[in-house]
Structures are given as structure tokens and as C-alpha cells.
Image (cartoon, helix red, strand yellow):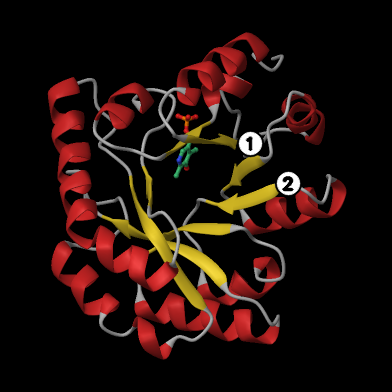
Amino acid sequence: MPVNTTAYQHIVKELSNTNTILVAVSKTKPNEDLMELYQLGQRDFGENYVQELVDKAAALPKDIRWHFIGHLQSNKVKYIAPFVHLIHGVDSLKLLQEINKQAIKNNRTIDCLLQIHIAEEETKFGLDEKELEQIITQIDQLSNIRISGLMGMASFSNDQHKVQNEFNNLSRIFTKIKSWILEHSGKEPILSMGMSGDYAMAIEEGSTMVRIGSLLFGPRNYTQ
Ligand SMILES: *Cc1c(COP(=O)(O)O)cnc(C)c1O
């Protein structure tokens, strides 16, 4: 399955009018595919698996910004801490504490997005609003963590209305804590929401960062 460079150019153009950052989600895809988009100017890539990310980061150009978008286990933080650009799916204080510890070891500050649970599916990870507020009160103790925004995943559903409501809910929470994030991080707060099937709606609802995989790289084959 070749990389869909036409779709890439189209999405880049579409996003250029909206101030939205594109993270090209390259999990399970070979280095050649990433390089094809790299050559077109893409620098932000997203991966879900620690070992795969570590291997790709070692092999590919050093100016790539690597986003970890999967569910990160505490015992694996150390492998990505030296180089990761942004960790999207942080949903516990325990994980933040481990990221902080590894960030200190590497003498850097690591940017993290807190994942909010917005989907109906119980299986999806994330914090509710109350847990978010609780975590925020403890961030000052974590010297090498920078909370730079929020992340969420909508239900896997054809019901557009439902998906829109979920994005809208995340956007509302984001609006509420935006000024805190700005003050804490000193950077424009990030709202990471939207994938191949729902990114247009996510942007409509206020997304500032979309994570797009299959639209660019084709469907994934997890068994290979
Ligand atoms: C795989 C993945 C994506 C990309 O999904 P597509 O539907 O292929 O665009 C985005 N976000 C997360 C968290 C993912 O795991």
C-alpha cells in the first residue's frame, strides 16, 4: 500500500487555514513510508508502541518530532524519555511521576497532554473532569513536567452527532482550563483531537492538533 501523498498535500493545505498541527500516525508502517512524508516536509510523527518508536527514532532523521500517542506503561517511560517531543495520552498521577523522574534523569522537561475520557466506550482510557482538576493541583510538585494541553478520542461510531457531542464536551473542558495551561506552560495550549475519520469535525469543534494515520498511510495490518 503506497503512501497517499495526494491526501497528504490536501490535508496540509486544509490545515494551513486553521492553525491546526498534523501529526502523521505511522504505527506499524515501515521507515520508507515515513521518509516519503518527511521528504514532503512532514516533521511530526505519532507512534503507539514504545519499542517501535525507539527503533524508528534511532534510524530516522534527528529533526523529527516524535509524539507518543499510545497508552504508556510506567515501566517503559525510560526508553522514550531522552527524545520524545510530546506524550499525548497521560491519564494518571503515577505515570506523570514516572515521566517526571525520567525527565530529571535526562535533564529535560517533557511536554504532556492529559487524556480526557469523552467516549461512551468504557474501554477507552482517560480522566474525567474531577480527576483532571485533582491532577492539576499536584503538577507544581513535578518540576520537569510541562502540561501543554489535553487529548481525547471520540467513540468509534458512525453517529456523527454523537462524535460531535463528545468533541464538543472535550472542547468545553479545554476552554475551562486553557488559561491555567497557558500560565503553567507558557505556550499556546494544545487540544489534540481528531483522527482519519473525524478530523474535520474535530477542527470544527476547536482541535489544534489532529492525529491522522490510515488516510495517509493506508489501512494497518497488525498481524505482520
Ligand atoms: C492509531 C491512532 C490514530 C490514527 O488513527 P487513524 O484512524 O488511522 O487516523 C490516532 N490517535 C490514536 C491515539 C491512535 O491510536
Q: Is 31 located above or below residue 53 in the figure?
A: above
Quadrant of the rendered structure where residue 119 is? top left
Q: Is residue 25 or residue 72 the one in the foreground?
A: 25
Give coordinates of residue 53: x percent, y percent. Answer: 69, 52
The residue under label 2 is which amino acid type? Ile
Q: Write the residue at 28% across / 76% down.
A: 136
Q: Is residue 121 visible?
A: no
The residue labelled by disc 1 is 26
- Of the two numbered discs 2 and 1 on the same chain, state the one appearing first in sequence: 1
Q: Is residue 224 left or right of residue 12?
A: right
Could you tell me which quadrant the C terminus lies in?
Answer: top right
Q: Is the C-beta of the residue carrying label 2 under 8 Å from the nearest atom of ligand 1?
A: no
Q: Is 223 located above or below residue 10 in the figure?
A: below
The residue under label 1 is which amino acid type? Ser
Q: Is residue 135 left or right of residue 176?
A: right
Could you tell me which quadrant the N terminus lies in?
Answer: top right
Q: Is residue 121 or residue 131 the one in the foreground?
A: 131
Q: Total marks drawn?
A: 2
Question: Few, some or many C-alpha atoms within 10 Å of disc 2 (few <14, some 14-19, many ≥20)?
Answer: some
Identify the element where label 2 is drawn. loop
Q: Write the residue at 36% across / 40% down.
A: 193
Identify the element where label 1 is drawn. loop
Q: Is residue 127 or residue 75 the one in the foreground?
A: 127
Quadrant of the rendered structure where residue 201 is? top left
Q: Is residue 158 left or right of residue 78?
A: left
Q: Write the residue at 57% across / 86% down.
A: 101
Q: Which mark is residue 8?
A: none
Give coordinates of residue 155: x percent, y percent. Answer: 25, 36
Q: Which mark is residue 64?
A: 2
